[in-house]
Amino acid sequence: MAHIRDINLIPLVYQMAPGKAYGMARNLMGMRASCLVELTTEDGVVGIGEAWGPAKATAGYLEVIKDAYIGRELYDREAILSDILCRYYHLGWQNQMLACISGINIAIYDAMGKTLGLPVCKLLGGRIRDRIPAYASDGYISRDPDNQLDAQLERIADRGFPGAKFKIGLGPKSDEQRVALARRILGDDMLLLVDTNGNYTVDVALDSMRRIAPYDVHFYEEPLPPQDFEGYRILTSRAPIPVATGEALYTIWDFCRMIAPRAVDVVQPDPTLCGGLDQAKAVALLCQAHSVRFSPHVWGSAVSVAAAVHLLASLPGYPHSDNQPYPQLLEYDVGTNPLRDELLIEPLHAIEGHVPVPDKPGLGIELDPEVVRRYRVD
């Protein structure tokens, strides 16, 4: 039987060169980090997952919840989650414990797929599509004179991406200047997506939206802090641009508070943080029930890309059939990050704006041990 024997973490860090930090309106980041989860079954099958956030915090929570998994079958994963959430409810759910659980859940799916000889997408509902349309996530805030918005967007303009997301949030006037520049560089046909990373209040977000609406912005991501549920309800009811959020929300309970009152137009759970593939799939079903669009957040290593690709490959286009106005888009970060580009023996690269769905068992990926050694920080 596929019982869990052990769970270990693999912290990885890529340190950027001086002056090359990039990021968002709230802050710049001088490194890219990832916390991989390695789960081993009693049969020797190894599943790989990824947990969002700092590895030291993830390690602390792993010590708290690890015993709930050891000795249990892979297929008990949802019962284990319920037991942990109920036993440790005083700790809250909007914390690194859920990121740790997310990484374990993804690793369980990888191990299940390898055990059964099936790709993860088939375990989630089927391989509905063989490649996933992606938008390029770029256009970061940067102090590097060689990596300003124009240079970043010019590098992706001819790569076949159906859309591009870039950072705003420095102020409404700056937002309009950045959006006008992006539209000029990327042309009239590419979808423009903008991201404030929660740096605004309702009034400032509305000012920003009204300024940039004439440039045909596809959606406006995280205009407000993630826990301002009432603010999102008010803003979405008045916004001239579709509102997207969800990367910092945990479990279906958080998303229900956002989706049920129609406080969001595009929902963006991150499988490495929201509770794993099971919770992300539950959020997708909730979106279907309320006819809300779904586009997962991805900003980690190649493992998180693979998990999101399998998730999207398994989702129907409901309520659409033959004619889907806009595809369910994968976020494909193109910022400098070897943990995404070098980590796998066979990289998951975007080809003409689409990422192929691996067809091997599990996530269908294999870590490059030399790259893991290079960036490991134990």
Image (cartoon, rainbow, N blue to C red):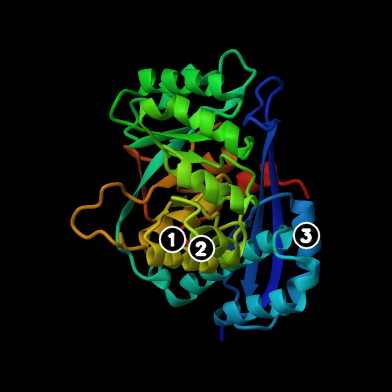
Q: Are marks 3 and 2 in contact (CB under 8 Å)?
A: no
- Residue 241 figure quarter: top left
Categorize mark 3 by other alpha carbons within 10 Å: few (<14), some (14-19), many (20+).
some
Mark 3 or mark 2, which has the lower sequence index?
A: 3
Quadrant containing the N terminus is bottom right
Mark 2 or mark 1, which has the lower sequence index?
A: 2
Amino acid at pointer 3: Ala
Outermost residue toward the left? 322
Amino acid at pointer 1: Leu
Q: Are marks 2 and 1 in contact (CB under 8 Å)?
A: yes
Q: Is residue 227 left or right of residue 356?
A: right
Amino acid at pointer 2: Ala
Outermost residue toward the top? 145
Q: Relative to residue 85, is residue 190 depicted above or below?
A: above
Residue 284 x, y percent position in the rendering: 44, 63
Residue denoted by label 1: 311
Residue 7 x, y percent position in the rendering: 70, 68
Residue denoted by label 3: 59
